[in-house]
Amino acid sequence: MTVPVWKKGLGLQAICDVRICHAFRWVDKHLASLKTAYARAPYLTDHMPFIEDTYRALFEKLIDLNLTFIHYLFRQLHIDTEIKLLSKLGIRTTGNQLLIDICRQQGASVYLAQPAAAKYLDGGPFQKEGFQIQFIKPPTPVYPQLWGPFIGNLSVLDLLFNCGPKAKEILLPKS
């Protein structure tokens, strides 16, 4: 499911400036899709009021909609990680230099990336600046789903709708 945004004639936009296009019935379509796909999910009703209220709030900017969902998911999964927005950091570089500048400003020594990012990262500048790049492949948690064999890498909403309060221990098992 995608949220339509205004882009025609706007060129390359900063993520914090992307505006939602409310000219289509996408809210009703998203809600109907979720209700249809997860009608028999044991924890759907625990989360639908929040989802419906959030969609119907008609946010102007995509970042506000996204952050509302992210904060909700953090609360549901008991995650207390601080979120920092690039738009608030005051960094104006691009490409590898942007990542290096973020690491420097945040006091990092290691930049974590998924293996697919390797073709876009030039390790030389990172190493020259004293930063290590570490490639990680997070495990795909397996949990009960409604239909057929397990399908990995779905939305965290699939996990919440199917597993409810057990979602955190499935996603972040104790070592």
Image: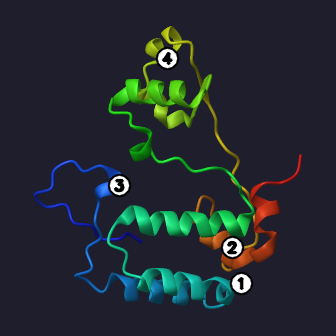
Image marks 2 and 1: residues in contact by CB distance under 8 Å: yes
Which residue in the protein does label 2 denote?
160
Q: Return the disc, 1 or 3, that comes first in the chain's sequence.
A: 3
Q: Amino acid at mark 1?
A: Tyr
Q: Quadrant of residue 57?
A: bottom left
Which residue in the protein does label 1 denote?
43
User: On the rendered structure, is 66 left or right of 22?
Assistant: right
Q: Residues within 10 Å of mark 3 (few under 14, many from 20)?
A: some
Residue 82 at x, y percent in the picture:
63, 50
Tell us which disc is closer to us: 1 or 4: 4
C-alpha distance separating marks 2 and 4:
38 Å
Residue 14 at x, y percent in the picture:
30, 49
Q: Residues within 10 Å of mark 2 (few under 14, many from 20)?
A: many
* Residue 126 shows in this picture: yes
Which residue in the protein does label 3 denote?
16
Q: Amino acid at mark 4?
A: Phe
